[in-house]
Structure formats: structure tokens, C-alpha cells
Amino acid sequence: MAVDQQRGPDDGLPDSALNPADYSSVVKTIPDNSPDTKVLYTLSARYFPLNLKVSIFDTLKSKSIPARNVLFVITFADQVLEKPLERDADLQTLRESYWRSLNSYLSLYSSQTIDRENVMVTSTKYPRSITKLFEKLIHSDHKTYYVIGQTNTGKSSLVQRLIVESNDYQSVPVVPKVSAKPCSTRRNGTFVCPYFGLTLVDTPGMLPKTHSIYAVLRPQLRQSVLSWGATNSIRTRVFTFRDTEQVLGLGPCMALRSRGHTGPLSLRQYFWGPTKLFRDLAEWQAWLADRRYVCGSRWTAYKLHASAGLCDVIISNLGFVRFENGCPPLTVYMPSCLRAVQRFYADEDHYKELELQANATFGRSESACASCTN
Ligand SMILES: Nc1nc2c(ncn2[C@@H]2O[C@H](COP(=O)(O)OP(=O)(O)O)[C@@H](O)[C@H]2O)c(=O)[nH]1
Ligand SMILES: [Mg+2]
């Protein structure tokens, strides 16, 4: 069977019509009072962990669906690795690490914990990862899964490939369409593999209206940002700050200011847009105010915690910056409605997470931001 990749929805909508489903309209389609229904929650490794909607457990509880029925699938594992995934052992290591991370992140907000068994890691570039997921699904008792998650986190790809995996696809008349263009899945699609009794419900992609790039960027740009995320891997750059007033711009939504730091800064980034070293502050201020990209959101300055060892700063829906050689006490500027966590590694697999606390807020009023999201 040809695995189908279409360029965009064929409903004639213009490219700028990015209409993400909201969280409540997606979960509303999961039947009430259905303790046997399961949820497969896709979390793209690119935005992990900030793309997890922590309130999912409460929502499902109101439908009598227990937390253990949620299977977290970390997709796009290939996008955040330097080497291709080639061995099941690597998959296992990743799974351990994401499981720990999920619990560490959740502990910032709730008392909920997740079992290791309920975390899987996949990449369409490593088909064995999908085989393993498939085996897990067919060995469970009740096999109806709602596949939910943010737009462009690989939900439709997963459903498509699970159907292929079932080798039962002749009995499945259509398979879901996959597209790099966000919000291509407009309504639920139910796919049944009769032989295994497996039912997969592919849902439209969600995008949070707050705490995300959706709330910040001009509408025409949201789409290209999200599509960019589906097709680009991380990049490594080394920057040298030569004086104390330089600013590093990471895409149009984040800047690092180097006051007090002059050494080289080795960064791995997964960010949309160009990375530029600004020579002086005035130029940077003009850039931040550039209304071509960003709605008139307020901006917040956060002081990063200094760290001698490896650390990451993860920004909701945008990506992450990794400080390879430790982090100097930089100030990071970003639109106030985005969230960020800083992650400190004791070693590759052990780390703790801290949400960044705002230091100062400046710029235009919040209301200008809201008016741009329509
Ligand atoms: N590199 C990579 N690309 C993927 C993976 N999963 C999906 N994609 C691509 O990401 C884009 C969005 O996938 P899609 O399944 O439509 O996402 P959905 O919006 O969540 O249904 C498509 O271009 C897919 O080919 C993955 O594991 N790795
Ligand atoms: Mg889809």
C-alpha cells in the first residue's frame, strides 16, 4: 500500500487558514462514561514536555477514564537525535529518559505519576518503533484508542502506519492523510483493523491558544512555523559574545542577552527562524518591535539559572536551546504568554526541571496580542 503524503488539505482553504481544533472540542468527541476507552497522546519530542496538557487527567477522569488508560507516545524521536535511531536498545534508553522526564515535569503541576509501561517512543524513520507500539496495542484488553495531541505531532502518520503494520489494511477502506501542513486533519476518522479488533480514532490537531506560539505570531506565520517544525532537525551553533551588550536573536520570538558574559556560547537549537548576533541593543529593540512577525504581545525577561553543566531551555511550541558547555547567567526575552522550563542535567539521563520565573515585563499591552489571534 502506498503510504500517502499529501501536500495539504484539499478543501480549498487558503494557506493562512490555520484552524486548530481546541482541546475541549477534541476531548468532547471521546464518549462519556467509557472506562474502557484508551487515549494515545502524541507528544512531539521537539516540543517536549511543554506540549503536554497537564489537565488531560482531570478531563478524562470526568469521563470515567482512568489515568492508566493514557498511553503517551513521544513521536519525532529522530528529530532531536544527532545519530539515526538504529537499535531497539536506543529506543529503550529514550523511553526511560522520556518516562522520567514526563514524571519530573508533571510533578511541577500535579501529584499524578505515569507508569513506565505507559510511555512509548516512536519515529517514522525507525519502523521498528511503530512495530513495538503496534504489539503493545494489540496485546491490551480493550482496543479502542483515541489518538490525540497537538497539530503536527504525527497522529495521522502513526494511525496510518499502525494500519499498515496490522497487515489488515485491505479491510480498511481508507487510511488517514498525512501532511506537513498543520491542521490538515479536520475531523475524527475511525479506522478499524478487524483481525486484531483494534480501533483507532484519529482526531484533529489541537493547538493551545495560550502559552503557545499560536497566541503570539501573526496568523500568516503560524502555519509556516508549524510546518517548519515538522521538517527540520536541530542545528548546532557556537556563538562568541565579544562585549557585554550583545544580543542573540533566536527566531523572531526569543532573544538572549549576554550582559556580563563574554566567552563562547555553544548552543544546539531547535528554533524556527534565523539566528542572529545583534551588535547593539538599539538594533535588537527595533527587531523585537518588528510587527511583521509577532503580535503586540508584552515581552518578559527571565534570568536563566547559571549552570556549570549541560542544560536546556525549552519554550512552549517553539523548541529548545541547549547550552552544551554550561549556562552563564543570561537574560532571556520572549513574549509573555509563552512558557519556558530550564532543565539541568546531572548526567545524560538524570536531570531536574525548573519553570522560569519572570524578572521584568515590558512592551505593549496584552490586548493587542489577543486581537491578532482571530
Ligand atoms: N521526521 C519525522 N517526521 C514525521 C514523524 N511523524 C510524522 N512526521 C511528519 O510530520 C508531518 C505531520 O504529520 P501528521 O501525521 O500529519 O501529523 P498530525 O497533524 O499530528 O496528524 C508529516 O509531514 C509527517 O510526514 C516522525 O516520527 N519523524
Ligand atoms: Mg492529522
Image (tube, helix red, strand yellow):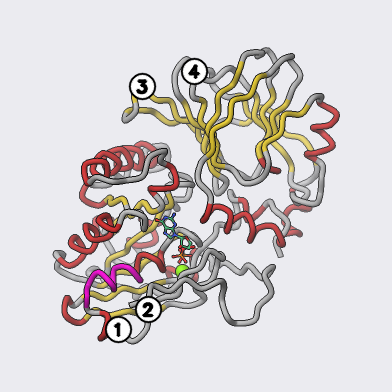
Q: Nearer the viewer, residue 109 or 284?
A: 284
Q: Is residue 79 above or below residue 60?
A: above
Label 1 packing within 10 angstroms: few (<14), some (14-19), many (20+): some
**Residue 44 in picture, x, y percent from top left:** 43, 52
Query: Are dots 3 and 1 in contact, CB under 8 Å?
Result: no
Label 1 sits on residue = 172
Residue 298 showing in the rendered view: yes
User: Which of marks 4 and 2 precedes in the sequence?
Assistant: 2
* Element on which disc 4 rests: loop
Label 2 sits on residue = 175
**Residue 33 in picture, x, y percent from top left:** 29, 73
Give the quarter of the figure containing the N terminus: bottom left
Tell me which secondary structure the magenta stretch mostly adopts. Answer: helix
User: Which of marks 3 and 4 precedes in the sequence?
Assistant: 4
Q: Which image quarter: residue 339? A: top right
Q: Residue at x 38, y 40 (%)?
A: 83
Mark 1 near ligand 2 (CB under 8 Å)?
no
Query: Whole-Å distance between the Cαs marked 3 and 2?
Result: 44 Å
Mark 3 near ligand 1 (CB under 8 Å)?
no
User: Which of marks 2 and 3 precedes in the sequence?
Assistant: 2
Label 3 sits on residue = 346
Query: Whole-Å distance between the Cαs marked 2 and 1?
Result: 7 Å
At label 4, the amino acid type is Ser
At label 2, the amino acid type is Val
- Between circles 3 and 2, the one closer to the viewer is 2
Which residues make up the magenta segment? Answer: 160-167
Label 4 packing within 10 angstroms: few (<14), some (14-19), many (20+): some
Label 4 sits on residue = 307
Residue 237: within the magenta? no
Give the quarter of the figure containing the C terminus: bottom right
